[in-house]
Structures are given as C-alpha cells and as structure tokens.
Image (cartoon, helix red, strand yellow):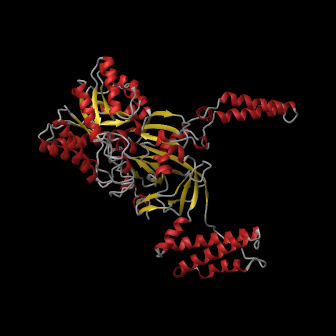
Amino acid sequence: MPAEQPLSESIYGIDRWSKGLLTVLPNGDVALCDPANPEAPAVSLPAILQDLQQSGIASPLVLRVKSFLEAEIRHLNESFAKAIEKTGYRAPYRGVFPIKVNQQSQVVDRIVEFGRQYHYGLEAGSKPELVIALAHRLSREALIICNGVKDAEFVRLAILSRRLGFNTVIVLESPKEAEIVIEVAQELGMDPLLGVRVKLTNQISGKWTSSSGDRSAFGMNTDQLLRVVDRLRDKGLLHCLKLQHSHLGSQVPDVNDVRRAAIEACRYFSELTREGVPLTHLDLGGGLGVDYTGEKRASDNSINYSMEEYCANVVETVAYEMDEAGIEHPVLVTESGRAVSATSSMLIFDVLESTLYDAPDAPEVEPDDHHLMADLAAISGYLVPERVQECWNDALFYRDELRAMFRRGHVELRQMARAERIYLHLMARIKDIAREGEHGADLDMELKKIADVYHCNFSLFQSLPDVWAIDQLHPIAPLQMLDQVPDRRAVLSDITCDSDGKMDQFILSGGISPSLPVHTLPEDQPYYLGVFFVGAYQETLGDLHNLFGDTNVVTIDLRADGGFDLLHEQEGDTIAEVLSYVEFDPAACIASFRRMVDEAISAGQLTAKDRKTLIGAYRDSMNGYTYFE
C-alpha cells in the first residue's frame, strides 16, 4: 500500500472511532486535529513526544488536550441549545460535570473556565467533591448538584454556600437524609435548595444495567418519595423542593432507553407537581455514552446514537410529556461526565521488549533425537497454502506429544529446546502463508491467539483500571509506522508482576480482536502505543499494584500553525511518594538501609567507597520514577 494511503482505517479504524480528533500523516504518524480550527495542520504525536522527551518529560505519560475537552463541552451545550430552539422548548439547559468522573484539578479548572459561558456547573457526590466545587467561581446561573450520602457537615456546608450566591442543590436520597437536612436547616435558620432523587423502574441495557431500575443503589421508591414530600410540607419546607433527579444509567448504549427513562421521569415530575411540589428543574442524570469502538450500535462499548440525537430525544420527549400534562417546561439538567471528558486524554507508553512466538530458522534434527522430532521437522516439506490447516494440526500434535514425553523424562532439555524452535519456525511460515492467502476462519482465530507479547512500560492497574476490572475497551494503536503494513500481532503486557496485567482485546476496523497488529520493534527508536479516550474515571480509580504510582501528566493546547503549547506538567510519583502512600517513611527506610551498610563495613564486608556507592544508589532509587527509565 502506498505511503500516501495510511492504514489507519483499514486496520485500526482510527477514522471510525476518533470523532475527527485524530488523523494519520503521510509519514505514518498519528496526529492530533484541532476541532476548533479544522484548517490548522494536524500535530504529530511522535513529534510531541520527542519534544517532551527533550524537556525531560518521559513516557509513560497521560497527555491531556485542552482543545478536545473544550470541544466536547461546546458540543454538548450547543447540541442542547439547538434542540431547544428547534423544538420550541420554553426553558434552558443547565448541565453539570460530575467531579467523580475526573477529579484532577487541571481538568475541573478547565471545565469550569470554558463552561462558564454556558452556565455549566458541577456535581459533587461527596464532601471532598463539594469542597472542590465551592472553590470555583461558577456562573451565577450554574448549579452545584449534591448527590450521594450526606451527613450533617456536608448539608451545613451546602446550605451555607448559598450565602455566597451558589445554587447548591441538596438532592435527597432517602427519608433519613431528609431528616438530617430539616434539622440542619432549622439550626441555621436558612432555607435549603432541595432536590429529590427518584428511582425509575425502567432498566437500561449495557454494562451498567445494575445502576438503573428499582434495584439501583441510590434514590427513593414511590412510597419513600411521598413520605419525604409530606414531611417537608409538615415542616414548612416544601417550597424549597425545586429539582427532581433521576439517574438513567451509565454509558447507555440504546437511545430508546433514554426515551423510555425520560418519559417515566416526566410522569413523576407531573404527579409531584399535582401534589403541590413547586418543581422547576428536571435532572436526568448521566447516561450519555461514548462510542469507544466506532461501531455505532447498542453494545457494551458502543452507542447507537450521536450527541445531537441524545439531546434532541431528551428535549422532544420532555416537551411532549410536559405539554400533555399542562405543565411549564422545566430547566433541563444532565450530568454527562463520560461524554465530556473521555476523549480529552490518552495514555502513551513505549514498548520495552517483545517475546516472539515464532522463529526465523529451525535447527537440524540430530541422529539421537526422538522420532517425533523428525515428524515435526518433516511438516516443513509439505507446508503449502492448500495444506496449511493440516500442517497447523500436525505441528500442534507433535509438539504436544514431545512436551508430554519431556514431562515423563523420555526427552531431555536440549532436545526439547530444539523441538520448540522447530515448532516456532513452522508457526512463522504458517503465519506468512495465512497472511498472503485465503484460509479458514478457525485457523485465523487460532493464529491470532498465538500472538507475540509486547512488554510495555505502564501499569494496567494504575492507568487503565477499568480494562482490568470491568473489561472496558479503549481504542489502542501504534503512534508511528502506520504507512507500513504491520508484520506481527501481539498482546500487551504491563510491567507489574501480575498475570492479569495484560490487554488481549483490541478494537480494530473489522471488530474486536484478541491481538493487536503491530510492527517489528525498530532498533534505533522507541515504539510508542497510545490508549485513547481515557479521560473518564481512569486516573483516580487506579491503584498502587506493585507500587507503580501516577504517571507523568502533560496538558497541551494545539496552535493554528501546527504546533502545540505546553500548558501544564505534573511529574509522576517518585518511589518515596508511593512508599508514603502505604505508610512507609522514606527517611526511615534510608536510615535503616544505612545502618545495615555500616554494620557490613564494621564486619569487613564493605569498604568506605562501597558505602558511598550503595547509599547513593538507594537514594537515587528513592527519588526516581516508579516506571522504567
């Protein structure tokens, strides 16, 4: 394939899932496109990494792109605005970003900054998140939605914040929580701004189906809801109840589920209004999904709708239901965190080395070798395209028989090593033949399963926890050489000492594959891989398996001239910092090591020069990056 026709679409599907944020340059580099300035030259990712490396910023790293985050905020708010105008909806949209989706200050700060023009607010599900929200100068019309379990301290801060002009809505999750709010409000002598969370019976499809329906963790059923309404009326606080909240579910794959849930939410809204509740806001929670695979269908990692369609469905459904009920249109609120932040970040790491499951040549069979060795080697003589499946079957049989004989002591170690080498050479030849011609689907799948292992400089558990925990798929692709046909297939292994630290499901243009097409590792330059759409949930959910800490984080902005500006750099955790997270005192560790060195000197095992070298090496490691340098 000519160099001017990159292989991104035919293999990795970049054009399908990247939403126009990525492209492939004629030289094979993956490049970033500025959604706010489509005419600007795309910026090569490998070139960005080279510049960062020269500045002392090494991989692995999380790269955040300000332009991408702003584009999604703009897209969401303008899509709602267009739907409202087209439908003739008589109230505005006031979205909020759930801080739990990405609590990093550089992300939240930029969301608040750019979202101010849209009166975009924040959602806090805990006291720490409320503290974050109240440290930001939001638009006077923006909301702070307080969800989750709330104690008196949480409630007190939320009510008091109204004195500063914050529209802080306390969403009541249970009758018990309502009693806490009533008590604190009476103590302060202030009216709270209240919402109530209603459990919808409609259950969504997809990976997070359990977060919806009447068995979901948060919210009240009909009986609890009416008890809270009556209690607020009795205490003279019903006039404070302005917002109804219902969570549709996370990453809703089917837009018809959005419609059905919105209809049910509107029924509650209209009935509560008839009960005398002065509701003005309808919060439909999260659910707006991300098409990680680009398949555009209702599946665990995809969605069958666009953002415009989602917004139009919500606005049209609520407008119709409210008109039918003769109720004024409420202010629309959604908590679309994943769709806003996922695309803005990518994890980039280098491949350290590879374990190859084929061999370029094969040893000769020796006279004393077992006859099965000769049978295995003889396959090479009839390995032709027409008999490739037969050769595959024979190679597996003879190899497995030889392994069984080795376990019983009938084949020695060096003989077994030669057998494995012969087998790997046969695999190399079978792969070459299969790559060039037609063969059965079963063989194709089996060949994908015997992929190489590319050992990569990252921790799955720290940087991609959802991949390990819930089988979340993220788009993955090499960042260079995409003008060349990949000559190998691999699964990706991280550098933790854990067999679960690997990725073996990949999004390709032809569907989900158990291996990733890759290139033979170049000898004179790093080989980078990018994992995309990691801006939602991945950073804070990561754990310290094997004590690998946070990676370096870089925020950039794209320039009109095809360059980029480095806006912020956050160095990754040092070993000393990680040790402190698990209750070790780095200074105490150094002191303990020094004592052992001094004892060894006293015993004559080390010299004074050795002391300096050992303690220096220990200190250097303590202050170093937790990843491969």
Q: Is residue 549 above or below residue 9?
A: above
Q: Position of residue 130 (x, y in %)?
A: 39, 28
The quarter of the displayed image where residue 418 is located: bottom right
- Report x, y in % for residue 184: 34, 22
Answer left or right for 610 relative to 551. right
Residue shown at 58% from the left, 73% from the top: 429
List x then y, in percent, for residue 142: 28, 30
Q: Quadrant of the C terminus?
A: top right
Q: In which quadrant will I find the N terminus?
A: bottom left
> Residue 523 vs residue 588: left or right?
left
Residue placed at 36% from the left, 52% from the top?
A: 291
**Total marks in image:** 0
Q: Note whether 383 is above or below 266 in the view shown.
A: below
State the image coordinates of residue 395 (x, y, percent, origin top left): 61, 75
100 in relation to 204, above or below: above
Q: Is residue 86 visible?
A: no
Quadrant housing residue 129: top left
Q: Most extreme residue toward the right, as rendered?
A: 604
User: At x 76% / y 34%, what residue is drawn?
Assistant: 613
Camera-side residue of 592 and 459: 592
Q: Nearer the viewer, residue 48 or 177?
A: 177
When asked about the image quadrant of residue 206, the answer is bottom left
Q: Is residue 281 visible?
A: yes
**Left or right: 339 as drawn, with respect to 390:** left
- 454, 8: nearer the viewer: 454
